[in-house]
């Protein structure tokens, strides 16, 4: 036995513990990114079935690792170098991504696309690079977990499938007097006792999610099972047809349950759970049909040699996984208004986002369409807040864009470079947990050579809202000159929340000093910015 192949005829309990640790370290760091999967496991949308993809992928990879013999020992040092390097690079992208590219990594779930790379890194650390060919197929399959893929397929098929489902329900219940179709199309009145309740067959009931759920298992059938390709094709067709038929049975069962036990219990318990139960039943049926079709899983090898990670590689894997999991814990509780959790509001008007502040009156300064710069559906609005007692004023500007990347490209630094201003000091902090802001002391160019230079204070932050016509990403600026800035001396002292590690990696660098009137202005404007942020994110107009 070599130092690089320490498991041969490994005791079952030792190999089982080793495998459980590998599964845990492959999964735990991505739990935050995978939250849309397990949070929507009972949802009536295609995303509900995506939870099966990582389960099947890891199960498929596990079978290949444990059942198929390795060709030979790897170089342990090379396994460690490559595994640690890939884990570090992937982990850094997972941690920095939500702060640097929040729209892609959080709102669009792009972090899930890095899951295969993370599993590959853990595989190299645990089993060696020789295991790559065993997990390559499952890891490619795991890419299907990205929600936009299945959402696009569902959107393309739902209209046709919902018409089928409605026709089937109409035909199967035509002879019953307790149900009859009404307008609009897809609506049925179902009698419960002496009362009729409307039941609507929406697009979510089309069976697209069931069809996609069945499609999820087809790659496993084709690439994991042994047997003739014709029999694999038959089993795949049964899976797809069975998914549609079971969804039609589900619809009939739901309306029957409304008739017998009433709508409250039906839609509270039966409706969300029945689809999940029927899908599990379909899986059992497919497994039962494997033997009649001559399909089988690869037989485990009795005399197998499985590479074993040394203590150093195991410690490295545990530390890297634990660190990434810890740094990603903020994703479990995103702040409202963050790019990953846009705050729903009931209006589309940009002007309605700038709130009225007690003690101030506001006057419109300008409004501009920014579509040529920030893309379609973008605009800029500026108002002047004037203290009703002192007449001191602060300018608030808000840029709204449908494309977060375009908004980021025209950030504060780019504006300063364009205008020739200089940043004398900067300090980044959390305006509220999850919303990063930066205070700047900006020195303007002199009006003439050798002339005096004025300095103003600017507070910048970004957030997002979900308006009736779509998500909008907002960049705010609140600025004032110290000599004419509003004074909020009666406000309680503020305590700036420090940045998280991932936020600190991408936030503007803190530098310079804040003294005298500049520091006082910064404090007053941060207090105003907190009030503006809280009020602008109120769900009511």
Image (cartoon, helix red, strand yellow):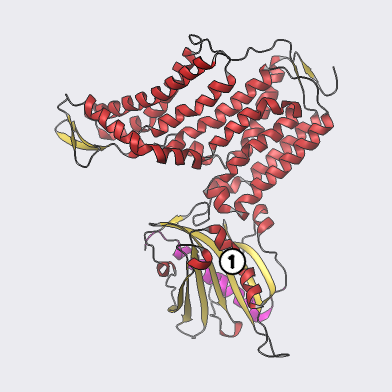
Q: Nearer the viewer, residue 525 or 209?
A: 209
Q: Is residue 477 above or below residue 502?
A: below
In the figure, 224 relative to 488: above or below?
above
Residue of label 1: 410
Residue 159, x across and y down, in percent: 34, 39
Q: Quadrant of the N terminus?
A: top right
Whole-percent x, y for residue 540 in the image:
37, 61
Left or right? Give the position of 290 relative to 324: left
Is residue 320 visible in the rendered structure shown here? yes
Question: Residue placed farthest to the right in the image?
Answer: 2
Which residue is depicted at the point 62% across and 14% down?
Answer: 298
Residue positioned most to the front? 230
What is the quadrant of residue 422 in the picture? bottom right
Q: Is residue 86 above or below residue 261?
A: below
Q: Secondary structure at mark 1?
A: loop
Closer-to-camera residue (469/327): 469
Number of numbered discs:
1
User: Residue 156 colored magenta?
Assistant: no
| Residue that appears at 51% across and 9% down | 291
**Residue 537 sits inside the magenta stretch:** yes
Q: Toward which corner of the image does residue 459 lie, by quadrant?
A: bottom right
Residue in view at x 56 percent, y 31 percent: 54
Name the residue rendered at 57%, 45% in the picture.
110
Left or right, 251 with reference to 308 = left
Q: Position of residue 198 (x, y in %)?
A: 22, 38
Quadrant that contains the C terminus? bottom left
- Determine if residue 128 is in view: no
The boundaries of the magenta stretch are 513-541
């Amino acid at each position: 036995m070599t130092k690089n192949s320490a498991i041969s005829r490994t005791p079952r309990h030792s190999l089982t513990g080793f495998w459980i640790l590998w599964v845990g370290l492959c999964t735990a760091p991505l739990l935050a990114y995978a939250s849309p999967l397990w949070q929507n496991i009972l949802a009536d949308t295609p995303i509900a079935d995506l939870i099966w993809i990582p389960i099947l992928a890891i199960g498929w990879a596990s079978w290949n690792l444990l059942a198929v013999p390795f060709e030979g020992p790897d170089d342990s040092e090379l396994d460690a170098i490559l595994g640690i390097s890939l884990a570090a690079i992937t982990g850094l992208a997972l941690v920095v991504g939500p702060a640097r590219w929040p729209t892609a990594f959080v709102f669009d779930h792009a972090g899930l696309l890095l899951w295969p790379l993370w599993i590959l890194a853990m595989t190299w650390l645990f089993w060696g690079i020789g295991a790559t060919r065993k997990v390559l197929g499952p890891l490619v399959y795991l890419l299907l977990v990205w929600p936009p893929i299945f959402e696009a397929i569902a959107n393309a098929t739902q209209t046709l499938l919902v018409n089928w489902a409605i026709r089937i329900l109409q035909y199967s219940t035509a002879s019953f007097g307790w149900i009859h179709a009404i307008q609009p199309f897809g609506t049925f009145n179902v009698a419960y006792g002496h009362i009729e309740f409307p039941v609507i067959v929406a697009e979510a009931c089309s069976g697209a999610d069931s069809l996609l759920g069945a499609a999820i298992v087809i790659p496993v059938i084709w690439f994991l099972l042994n047997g003739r390709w014709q029999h694999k094709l038959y089993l795949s067709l049964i899976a797809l047809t069975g998914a549609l038929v079971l969804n039609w049975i589900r619809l009939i069962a739901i309306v029957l349950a409304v008739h017998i036990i009433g709508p409250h219990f039906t839609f509270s318990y039966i409706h969300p759970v029945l689809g999940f139960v029927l899908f599990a039943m379909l899986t059992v049926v497919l497994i039962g049909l494997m033997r009649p079709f001559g399909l089988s899983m690869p037989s485990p090898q009795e005399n197998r040699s499985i590479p074993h990670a040394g203590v150093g590689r195991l410690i490295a894997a545990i530390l890297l996984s634990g660190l990434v999991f810890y740094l990603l814990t903020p994703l479990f509780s995103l702040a409202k208004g963050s790019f990953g959790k846009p705050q729903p509001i009931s209006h589309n008007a940009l002007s309605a986002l700038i709130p009225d502040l007690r003690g101030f009156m506001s006057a419109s300064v300008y409004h501009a369409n920014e579509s040529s710069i920030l893309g379609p559906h973008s605009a800029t609005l500026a108002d002047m807040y004037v203290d009703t007692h002192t007449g001191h004023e602060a300018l608030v500007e808000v840029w709204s864009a449908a494309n977060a990347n375009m908004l980021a490209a025209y950030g504060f630094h780019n504006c300063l470079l364009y205008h020739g201003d200089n940043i004398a000091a900067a300090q980044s902090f959390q305006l509220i947990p999850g919303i990063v802001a930066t205070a700047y002391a900006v020195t303007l160019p002199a009006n003439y050579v050798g002339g005096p230079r004025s300095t103003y204070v600017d507070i910048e932050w970004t957030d997002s809202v979900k308006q009736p016509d779509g998500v909008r990403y907002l960049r705010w600026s609140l600025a004032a000159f110290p000599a004419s800035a509003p004074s909020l001396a009666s406000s309680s002292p503020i305590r700036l929340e420090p940045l998280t590690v991932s936020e600190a990696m991408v936030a503007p660098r803190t530098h310079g000093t804040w003294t005298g009137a500049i520091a006082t202005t910064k404090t007053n404007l941060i207090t105003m910015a907190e009030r503006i942020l809280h009020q602008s994110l109120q769900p009511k107009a």
